[in-house]
Image (spheres, helix red, strand yellow):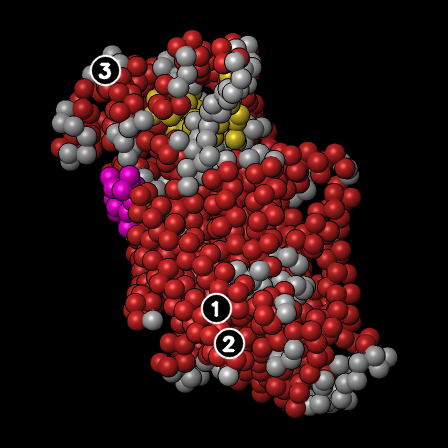
């Protein structure tokens, strides 16, 4: 499996440590050439450097080791050591990870980071460990996106503009319900078909982290770009607890430090890329960029939050608790 | 590396020993997993998750559409119209055979659907007119390839899913290449008939009235491709739902033509479940095999090797084509895509080859493999449909590789043939 | 075989349901601007059952793709042993896969799909069932071959 155990000779030299490095498999979703992909490679390089070559992280980009759920199962089965993605992939183990995709629940990334590193966040970390997985980047600073936009065929500046708008929805119940609550008409369409769906008006809008827009050419067919950042996103580098415990304490700390440093680096990279992309979209696709009055949208979401708190989907009072984090 | 080589060695041995392709893949994957000290649950996991794609849902629909056309006599109407249209050209019914496949392709998504249904009609007609059995079978097999190039197409759906490109875009990219392949085959038939290299009965006079009559008789059947493509490009349906539209339209045609019969339609459903099960089980097991290949880092080794040979786009395409033709003679198209695409995609991306263009080239190349011994599924199907021995079938198809390969080269080196239409419609 | 025949009807029913459900989705979306978001997940579940139960039937009807070209070329006395070996291999692989699938089910009991909240186990179950049916079928196939073999040996000595 993941960690190749150092083999020992039959001879009398059992004391002598073999120089065999420990290999760790890290599966990711994004291709190598993206800012996220570069950050993962940066992580691998850091680990190698810090451990003097004793730990070797091998990155498997672009879902080479399977879809998200498969890779998580792989970690639990001990077939791969690490997986890096959004926290919502872990909702089978703790439903509270889904809080991160509730639109307009978090004010900004800072709020979101406080939540992740605070009481609830740490509790989620504990649950994951009980289930055999550990989040390495404890500072939760690996920004994805760095922010989310809504691209539409007509301008969307206020909640009113959203009424009846056919929005492409991913396969997420909360997302669908939330946009229905806002008055939109969510339609589930595969990510790769979204461009055509927009072009052919099967849907009229899509939400996406800004980082993915240019590659998907969405702005070509939906040039009205609203920065809604309805839920901040981050990437967690998660490691199989079994693989983690097989390592020395020194090696464990190296991984955690490297993961946090990679998070910082990633944030830098995605922010640069986002600015570059936005410029290109303005030049080549003639996009219009709008900001929203966040309070208006949050207010509209109030009843939804109350419903969600009462639905029993999350432990009672959780939503309130999250909103009160200052 | 050792594990990777063992994987392929075990696979080939089992395959040649007559174990079903799916099981040869499963067992060789299992051996590799055990050797690599991986958890073997990964096999079950990837088999199940490999088929969990909404895009692949189009596969049973497009197979069913073809089967329904065959079961309800709509295929016969397409053939009659084609006969009226082109049997006056040198090569007569052989030309009809090609044109009929072209039209039939507009609703059926597989080459096998063409061979088993339309193929039987074409064989019967050609034999009655005095064409040789081997030439009839060969031209039927070669033209059936078009069935999976002109949209809808099951191989395209699978490629689009794996290469993460839009199905609708890839579908449109297949239209012109399908016509190019047909043209190459028709030109070949014309030449061999004209110079008497193949003895063919004299062609029949052209009768405009017959064209008009068969056109009216087959009107709704001939409209099918427009309805399906139109539905998809017009934004009414997603590509998956276009498959469903094809099914509903075929049922609608059977009602219009009063050919609706519970027994034959039941048979079409039955055959669809079996064919889909074969294809999708291959997709599932192929996903597992592809997983081990990736985990063992073979893609990087292989692509470094290929890129080390050349960084010229044209030479690389030639190399890839040769590799695919070779593998296509040994394996089914779907597992080849599952295993090879992780290797090939980074290469073609880095050389600036369009993924859509490559999808057309790769899918067509692997369809030729279907007519190549020893592992050509089409050869087996046609030898049973055409009542001809496997050896004779192989001998008969040999000369037709000339137009098939010619079309492959044309499609490989003129990307515009694939890309012009999608660019026109989508960009 | 009775169980694979029964299973095959379930697979057929899945295909019919796939058509009905997705037709409802198109009609509803196009005419009523309403999208049933759970239909995709249910469709994939139906696909899972259709494929795997269908595959059990494929094995019974010997419709799976296999390369008989080389085996057919073998000297007559080797053909039956090779065929027998293939049945033994299918038996082994299917049994193993069945057991692994069940063990996978046991660790994924709590897992559910994102929108409809369907238990993930439901997606794995048809694979386990199909593999069990192939196990039975390969025993039947092996017995058939041994009977043919004995019959021929009998003729030869008789
Ligand atoms: Na034909
Ligand atoms: Na077709």
Q: Which mark is residue A121?
A: none
Give the magenta part as a residue range.
C105-123
Q: Is residue C48 left or right of residue B283?
A: left
Q: Is residue B291 left or right of residue A129?
A: right
Vertical relation: C21 (above or below) B198: above
Mark 1: few/some/many CA within 10 Å (<14, 14-19, 20+): some
Pointer 1 with pointer 2, Cβ within 8 A: no
- Residue at disc 3, secondary structure: helix
Q: Which residue is mark 1?
A: C63
Q: Position of residue B372 (x, y in %)?
A: 68, 64
State yes or no: Cβ of the residue under disc 3 lies below 8 Å from any atom of ligand 2.
Answer: no
Vertical relation: B177 (above or below) A136: below
Mark 3: few/some/many CA within 10 Å (<14, 14-19, 20+): few
Q: Residue at x 18, y 24 (%)?
A: A318
Q: Is residue B347 left or right of residue B406?
A: left
Q: Earlier in the sequence, mark 1 or mark 2?
A: 1
Q: Which residue is mark 3?
A: A119
> Magenta residues: mostly which secondary structure?
loop
Q: Chain of mark 1?
A: C
Which quarter of the rendered picture does the N terminus of chain B lie within? top right
Q: Residue at x 48, y 40 (%)?
A: B33
Q: Which residue is mark 2?
A: C153
Marks 1 and 3 sit apart, C-alpha to C-alpha, by 58 Å
Q: Are marks 1 and 2 on the same chain?
A: yes
Marks 2 and 3 sit apart, C-alpha to C-alpha, by 77 Å
- Residue at disc 2, secondary structure: helix
Judge whether residue B174 can be spotted in this image: no
Q: Nearer the viewer, mark 1 or mark 2?
A: 2
Circle count = 3
């Amino acid at each position: 499996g993941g960690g190749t155990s150092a083999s020992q000779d039959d001879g009398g030299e059992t004391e002598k440590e073999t120089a065999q490095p420990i290999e760790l498999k890290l599966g990711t979703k994004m291709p190598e050439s993206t800012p996220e992909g570069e950050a993962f490679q940066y992580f691998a390089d850091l680990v190698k450097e810090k451990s003097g070559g004793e730990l070797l992280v091998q990155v498997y980009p672009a879902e080479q080791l399977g879809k998200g759920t498969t890779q998580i199962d792989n970690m639990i089965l001990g077939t791969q050591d690490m997986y890096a993605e959004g926290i919502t992939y872990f909702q089978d183990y703790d439903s509270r990870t889904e809080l991160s995709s509730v639109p307009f629940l978090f004010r900004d990334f800072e709020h979101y980071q406080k939540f992740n590193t605070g009481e609830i966040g740490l509790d989620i970390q504990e649950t994951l460990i009980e289930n055999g997985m550990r989040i390495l980047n404890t500072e939760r600073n690996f920004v994805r996106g760095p922010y989310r936009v809504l691209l539409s065929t007509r301008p969307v500046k206020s909640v009113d503009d959203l009424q009846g708008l056919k929005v492409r929805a991913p396969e997420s119940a909360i997302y669908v319900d939330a946009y229905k609550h806002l008055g939109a008409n969510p339609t589930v369409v595969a990510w790769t078909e979204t461009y055509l769906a927009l072009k052919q008006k099967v849907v009229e809008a899509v939400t996406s982290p800004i980082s993915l827009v240019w590659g998907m050419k969405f702005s070509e067919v939906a040039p009205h770009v609203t920065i809604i950042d309805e839920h901040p996103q981050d990437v967690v580098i998660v490691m199989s607890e079994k693989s983690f415990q097989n390592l020395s304490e020194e090696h464990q700390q190296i991984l955690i430090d490297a993961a946090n440093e990679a998070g910082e680096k990633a944030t830098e990279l995605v922010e640069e890329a986002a600015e570059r992309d936005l410029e290109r979209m303005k030049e080549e696709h003639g996009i219009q960029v709008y900001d929203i009055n966040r309070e208006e949208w949050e207010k509209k979401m109030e009843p939804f939050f109350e419903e969600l708190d009462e639905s029993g989907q999350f432990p009672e009072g959780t939503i309130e608790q999250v909103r009160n984090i200052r | 590396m050792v594990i990777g080589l063992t994987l392929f060695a075990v696979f080939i041995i089992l395959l040649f020993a007559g174990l079903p392709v799916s099981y040869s893949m499963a067992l060789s994957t299992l051996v590799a997993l055990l050797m690599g000290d991986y958890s073997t649950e990964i096999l079950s996991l990837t088999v199940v998750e490999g088929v969990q794609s909404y895009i692949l849902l189009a596969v049973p629909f497009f197979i069913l559409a073809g089967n329904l056309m065959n079961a309800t006599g709509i295929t016969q109407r397409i053939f009659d119209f084609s006969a009226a249209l082109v049997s006056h050209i040198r090569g007569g019914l052989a030309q009809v055979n090609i044109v009929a496949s072209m039209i039939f392709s507009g609703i059926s998504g597989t080459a096998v659907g063409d061979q088993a249904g339309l193929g039987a009609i074409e064989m019967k007609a050609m034999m009655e007119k005095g064409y040789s059995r081997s030439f009839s079978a060969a031209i039927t097999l070669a033209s059936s390839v078009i069935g999976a190039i002109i949209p809808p197409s099951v191989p395209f759906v699978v490629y689009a899913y794996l290469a993460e490109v839009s199905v609708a875009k890839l579908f449109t990219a297949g239209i012109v290449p399908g016509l190019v392949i047909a043209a190459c085959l028709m030109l070949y038939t014309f030449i061999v008939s004209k110079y008497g290299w193949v003895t063919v009965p004299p062609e029949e006079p052209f009768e405009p009235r017959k064209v008009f009559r068969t056109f009216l008789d087959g009107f709704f059947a001939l409209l099918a491709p427009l309805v399906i493509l139109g539905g998809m490009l017009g934004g009414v349906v997603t590509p998956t739902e276009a498959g469903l539209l094809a099914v509903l339209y075929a049922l609608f045609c059977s009602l219009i033509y009063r050919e609706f019969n519970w027994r034959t339609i039941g048979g079409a459903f039955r055959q669809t479940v079996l064919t889909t099960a074969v294809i999708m089980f291959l997709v599932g097991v192929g996903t597992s095999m592809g997983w081990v290949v990736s985990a063992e880092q073979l893609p990087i080794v292989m692509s470094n090797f290929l890129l080390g040979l050349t960084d010229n786009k044209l030479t690389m395409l030639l190399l890839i084509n040769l590799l695919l033709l070779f593998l296509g003679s040994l394996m089914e198209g779907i597992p080849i895509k599952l295993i090879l695409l992780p290797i090939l995609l980074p290469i073609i991306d880095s050389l600036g080859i369009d993924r859509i263009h490559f999808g057309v080239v790769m899918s067509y190349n692997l369809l030729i493999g279907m007519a190549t011994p020893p592992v050509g599924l089409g050869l087996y199907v046609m030898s049973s449909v055409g009542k001809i021995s496997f050896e004779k079938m192989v001998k008969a198809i040999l000369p037709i590789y000339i137009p098939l390969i010619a079309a492959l080269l044309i499609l490989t080196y003129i990307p515009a043939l694939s890309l012009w239409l999608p660019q026109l419609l989508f960009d | 075989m009775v169980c694979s025949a029964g299973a095959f009807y379930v697979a057929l029913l899945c295909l019919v349901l796939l058509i009905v459900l997705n037709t409802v989705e198109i009609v509803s979306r196009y005419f009523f601007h309403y999208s049933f978001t759970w239909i995709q997940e249910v469709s994939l579940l139906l696909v899972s059952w259709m494929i795997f139960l269908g595959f059990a039937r494929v094995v019974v009807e010997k419709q799976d793709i296999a390369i008989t070209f080389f085996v057919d070329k073998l000297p007559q006395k080797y053909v039956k042993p090779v065929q027998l070996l293939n049945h033994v291999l299918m038996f082994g692989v299917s049994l193993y896969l069945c057991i692994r699938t069940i063990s996978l089910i046991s660790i994924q009991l709590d897992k559910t799909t994102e929108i409809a909240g369907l238990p993930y186990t439901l997606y794995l179950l048809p694979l386990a069932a199909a593999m069990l049916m192939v196990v039975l079928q390969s025993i039947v196939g092996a017995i058939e071959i041994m009977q043919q073999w004995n019959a021929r040996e009998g003729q030869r000595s008789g």
